[in-house]
Image: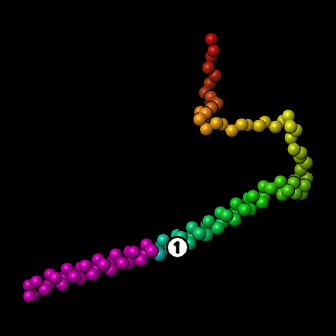
Amino acid sequence: MVFWGVPVMTLMAALGLVYLHLHSACESVGRDIKRLENEHAELRKRVVNEERNWVAARSIRNMETLMARHGIVMTWPAEQNIIRLRAAEPGEPAQYAFRGAAVPRD
């Protein structure tokens, strides 16, 4: 009995220590997850708030108020100065400008 009792007790003590270590690691990870979730929620609130501020700042009425406050006189462009772009068809390949040197033609 003593011959098998010492190794069994040592094994049980080792398993207990492994369990305590795993439990501590899981608790630590759980705290980190909770902290990161709270941080994510706070950052999401800040993003929504900044998006709302940006929409308000770029409104036409606000731009006109800011231009009047700073003494900037601007008007809308004339119709002939407006370039309208059409949306590409979904199946149409994208066309990119050539950035290299000019290609000599024959």
- Between 72 and 40, the one lying in front of the other is 40
- Between 97 and 85, the one lying in front of the other is 85
Query: Can you give x and y, in whole percent of width and height, for residue 35 in the image?
Result: 52, 73
- Residue under the point 59% across and 33% down: 93
Question: Looking at the image, is 10 positioned above or below residue 29?
Answer: below
Check disc 1 and report its element: helix, strand or loop.
helix
Quadrant of residue 75 within the rendered picture: top right
User: In the picture provided, is 17 more to the left or to the right than 31?
Assistant: left
Question: Looking at the image, is 87 positioned above or below residue 105?
Answer: below
Can I make out residue 75 in this image? yes
- Residue under the point 69% across and 65% down: 49
Query: Can you give x and y, in whole percent of width and height, for residue 62 in the image?
Result: 84, 57
Residue 7 in magenta stretch: yes
Q: Which residue is mark 1?
A: 35
Q: Amino acid at mark 1?
A: Arg
Kindly give the residue lying farthest to the top in the view shown.
Answer: 106
- Residue under the point 42% across and 77% down: 27
Q: Quadrant of the C terminus?
A: top right
User: In the picture provided, is 43 more to the left or to the right than 3?
Assistant: right
Classified by dominant secondary structure, the portion drawn in magenta counts as helix
- Residue under the point 27% across and 81% down: 16
Query: Can you give x and y, in whole percent of width and height, for residue 39 in the image?
Result: 57, 70
Question: What stretch of residues is rendered in magenta?
Answer: 1-30
